[in-house]
Image (tube, helix red, strand yellow):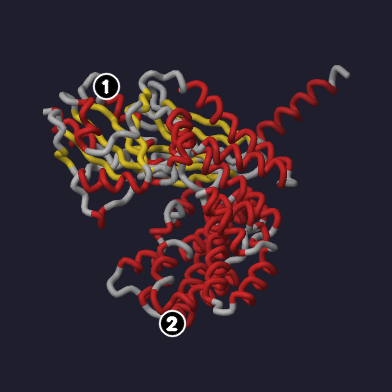
Amino acid sequence: MRILIPLMGCLFAQTVFAQRLTLTGTTKRGTTVELNETYDGNYWKKQAVLLQADGAGHFKKYLIGTSPKWVWIGDEANRKWVLLSPGRPLQLSLRQGDISFSGTAARENQLIAKLGLESVQHLTFVKELAHQPSYATASVDSFLRYKLPLILKSLDSTRKVVRHAGLPKTVTQTILSEVNCYYACGMTGDLVYWLNQGKNRRDFHLRFIDTLQAHFPVPSAAELALSPAANLYLERLFRLRVWKLIYTYQSDPDKRHADSVFFKATGLRFEALKKEVIEKGNEMLVFSTRLKALLPGYAWEKWLNNALFGASMSGRLQDSGWLLQFIQRNTRDSNLVAQAVAMYAPLKKARDKYAANLNIRIRPDYRQVNSVESLLAPYKGKVVFIDLWGTWCPHCIEDMAYEPSLKKRLEGKDVVFLYVAQDEDRDDEKWRDFIFVNNVVGEHVRKSADEIGMLWNALGIAEKDWAYPHYLIADRSGKIVVKSAERPGEGDGLYQQLTEALR
């Protein structure tokens, strides 16, 4: 027994070490390094963990896992994928925007850096979409005959590079899955926008989508558990299947036949689904929960969790709560249910925590605001940053994540952050919950879609430019001096504009 106990302890220690994903590195001393794990394949600033470099410039992070894990290093504009694997420590050196690798996991990460998997904009066929004229302005038939074989040939060449890199089998398979879904995401991004237009619309829905799925089927459960690109592709593939389903219904002149086909594919009546979308005001929420038949069971359950993750990261308390209850009733995978519960838990805590924040002020007169003068009257003598947004607008929510640091830089200065939301009366509680869950410090006004048009006009914005998010700056006298301010996440531009208005 005296011999056995220490031996068991050593075996246990080795097992734990083998399950530890090790990341260490060096950078400029005293700085921070952003590390970001993803659940649904998207970048969420809220997920970022800042690793503080010590006085010698060293930083480290340990994660627990029995499988490889993709993590981003760096902020949204400069992020790079790195792959961490059990028993394969990785060391990074970050210097002036450059990244170099050492340690056991250096080889795979050098390969990943060369492949540029962070953005599909690195793919040649995606870059070509910017050309005038682009191949995407041709017919769908032309694309399928001539361009698609070249794209698949490029994918096959990339796969060969990965296979011949001499990496461990598990690492090789992880990268191959990412590469395959990476190309699938490239095929379902901007390319979809260009092909799904004009005379192409029928062939796009009835030929392109089916051909795409033949080459890039629904990712497997194993891929969805590991690959960020697989989860992004799942989202896009689900949308394409919804598009095809609705296009097929709407383009069929025989509505009795169309109803029969739609019901056979979904188990639902089209008009009933349409009514539910109108009632809930969120079509993707309805489609995600009601069109289960469009995905295999395991993929549908993962897609529901991804939708909940996005709602939670966006601070949409009510949508998240509704989705969580639906997942708890309809998901068989207990691990996914546990993950869903963990996603939702911080939202309610945040709502309760920030409800008492006196720096969040919902204007008591917001229903009476009907002119620029009444909007800005309480802030005479101060510079006002106006954020036109909506709880339904993902880019608005993304930008808000950058505003706390801007507010900190302007602390003590006469700048008011005024948020004007386009949300309907039925969503008043959703709007209030969002503000408190996300601790959106500032002044708040809400207007319906019918009401806010008046404000757009009064602010001097042409109707063709009505798009969310939109930012303006008013000077101390209440005059709009910047009709289209910089976005909060795009460097120092907005800070400079506000500083100039203060002068």
Residue 281 in the image, given as x and y percentages of width and height: 50, 49
Residue at the extreme right of the image, as rendered: 1
Q: Give the spatial CA distance, label 2 vs label 1.
A: 57 Å
Task: Identify the residue at horizontal 46%, vertical 22% (top origin).
Answer: 355
Label 1 sits on residue: 411
Disc 2 is placed on an element classified as helix
> Crowding near pointer 1: few (<14 within 10 Å), some, many (20+)?
few
What amino acid is labelled 2 in the image? Ser
Q: Is residue 99 visible?
A: no
Residue 114 in the image, given as x and y percentages of width and height: 43, 55
Q: Is residue 135 visible?
A: yes
Query: Which mark identifies residue 180?
Result: none
Instruction: Name the foreground residue: 183 vs 110.
Output: 183
Query: Which mark identifies residue 142?
Result: 2
Task: Identify the residue at horizontal 31%, vertical 41% (top origin).
Answer: 388
Task: Identify the residue at horizontal 20%, vertical 23% (top origin).
Answer: 414
Quarter holding the C terminus is: top left
Instruction: Name the foreground residue: 378 vs 338.
Output: 378
